[in-house]
Amino acid sequence: MAEETTRRKRGGGRAGNTRRTSSNLPDQMPWNPPINRDRPTEPLDEAGVQAIHDGCMRILKEIGIEFLNPEACKILKDAGCKVVGTNVKMDEDFVMEMVGQAPSEFTITPRNPDRSITIGGKHLLFGNVSSPPNAWDLERGKRSGDFESYKEFIKLTQFFNCIHFAGGYPVEPIDIHARERHLRCLYEKLTLTDKVVHAYSLGRERVEDVMEMTRIAAGISREEFDSKPHMYTNINSVSPLKHDFPMLEGAMIHARRNQPTIVTPFTLAGAMAPVTMSGAVTLSLAEGLAAIALLQVINPGSPCAIGTFTSNVDMKTGAPAFGTPEYMRATQMTGQMGRFYDLPIRSSGVCAANVPDGQAMWETSNSLWAAVQSGTNVVYHAAGWLEGGLIASPEKFIMDCDVLQQIQRYMDPMTYATTPDDIAVEAIRDVGPDGHFFGCEHTQERYQNAFYSPMISDWSNYEAWDLKGGVWTAERAHGMYKDIINEFEAPPIDPANQEELKDFVARRAAEGGAPTDF
């Protein structure tokens, strides 16, 4: 029992509380962001890499990118780019010089330094589903996002050790007015979790409020906040060939204050990008590199990552498709190009399924393993995503976390260790041709931790499963989700910092919050 309590204590929430009596809570792996030691899958040969790079440079020099932000246009014009109205053209030497200034690896430190994460290199990080307008669970079905559902997903984000950062809102709480939604959501995120948090780049006020709240929660000065990364943002281009005003404004504020920006064009082959995957990847990279170049002009060395969200549409209906073979190849190709530019890489765990069924899991598994194969460093939407990003589901969240833990176990060096004890020649000699390994000393010393133990899978045979009620996977996940929420306890935060956060939220809300028109 002491060992079990110790393991659970690492999970966040009320992890490790000895008053727990439920048997439906997962015995999860400890907090240990994995290192991806595998060689990445690289579909492109040297000529293919060069062809995509050349295509990116031609787009940036000959066609240009629309920067719908006058300040960004002025900055780039002063830096020597050709700017006509909102169209910005930049040559290869400029782009490569600017992109070359971005660090290949950086660390983000949240209010709990033990939850720091490193982005880049061989590090692999998973984040919660972000930004769906709707929620779905087995009891209530599909519904518009609300504040209570938002808080439930934040609790799941904190509870699971395989979720390493708290990305955007796991569901949009439409019952909170947009002008103060960021204030109330970030208060809950900063108090219900102690993991790295995210700011939506939707204008100056929201970004600066989130930065100030992150600083207050950590109990540090502005100078300490600006000295190194403590939170981050993600921006999307408006494909094809545009960056909008509020996202650019937010990203520029982040750059000036040394906070990371992940630049992730959202391109669907056959709709917002060419129908060929190499064409879609080329357009996506050109849009991303253009924004990173801007941020490096503003603050050379400011942390950035290049993101991929390149998939295809169903050409019969026009609906987005995810977890497809094309999505997997686009992710691998973008990862290969990210290494070419020496930038950290972001991808996503996604599916087009409407409920947490077989389709949901095979599409999500395809996208997650594509992230692993691509050498991705940051995986957005790794748990809880449904309906192409329109639904967040707690059952799906838990089912995905089991997959994430399996990936983490797969990455553990113990699974491929080759010491003499692992080769086990003496054990093989002792058992011989007529024995078995169940009872041998070698097995007895290792059986408790020899293999991955799933959180939600049921490995019993059909008769045993049926005798227990024939509970399907999503139903088991639903029961686990309810127990986690019912027994959740927030991680500790300095009471003075929490009180200051409350005062800040109240003051900014009284001032009107943030504007809702852009």
Image: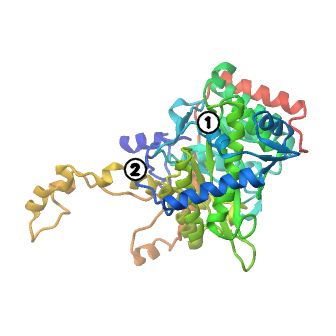
Q: Residue at x 62, y 48 (%)?
A: 306
Residue where numbered disc 1 is placed: 303
Residue density around tag 1, few if under 14, some if 14–19, many if 20 or more, within 10 Å: many
Q: How many marks?
A: 2
**Residue 138 seen in this snapshot:** no
Neighbor class of circle 2 (other Cα within 10 Å; few <14, some 14-19, many 20+) is some
Q: Which mark sits nearer the N-terminus, 1 or 2?
A: 2
**Left or right: 397, with 518 as reference point:** left
Q: Amino acid at mark 2?
A: Arg
Residue 351: % across, % down: 62, 66
Q: Secondary structure at mark 2?
A: loop
Q: Pick whichever, 395 or 514, lies toward us.
A: 514
**Whole-percent x and y of residue 435?**
12, 68
Q: In the figure, is residue 118 to the left or right of 152?
A: left
Where does the image place residue 242, in percent across and percent down from the top left? 79, 52
Residue for point 56% across, 44% down: 343
Q: Secondary structure at mark 1?
A: loop
- The location of residue 26, given as percent across then percent down, is 48, 53
Q: Which mark is residue 34?
A: none
Residues 276 and 226: in front is 276
* Residue marked by disc 2: 37
Task: Using residue 53 as the reference point, say whether residue 370 is left or right of it.
Answer: left
> Residue pushed farthest bottom?
316
Task: Reply above or below: 367 against 318.
Answer: above
Residue type marked 1: Pro
Image vertical order of residue 410 relative to residue 278, above or below: above
User: Above or below — where is 353 with respect to 233?
Assistant: below
Q: Quadrant of residue 488?
A: top right
Distance between the alpha carbons at the discs numbered 1 and 2: 23 Å
**Residue in the foreground of this view, choosing between 279 and 112:** 279
Q: Residue at x 48, y 44 (%)?
A: 123
Residue occupying the point 75% across, 68% down: 271
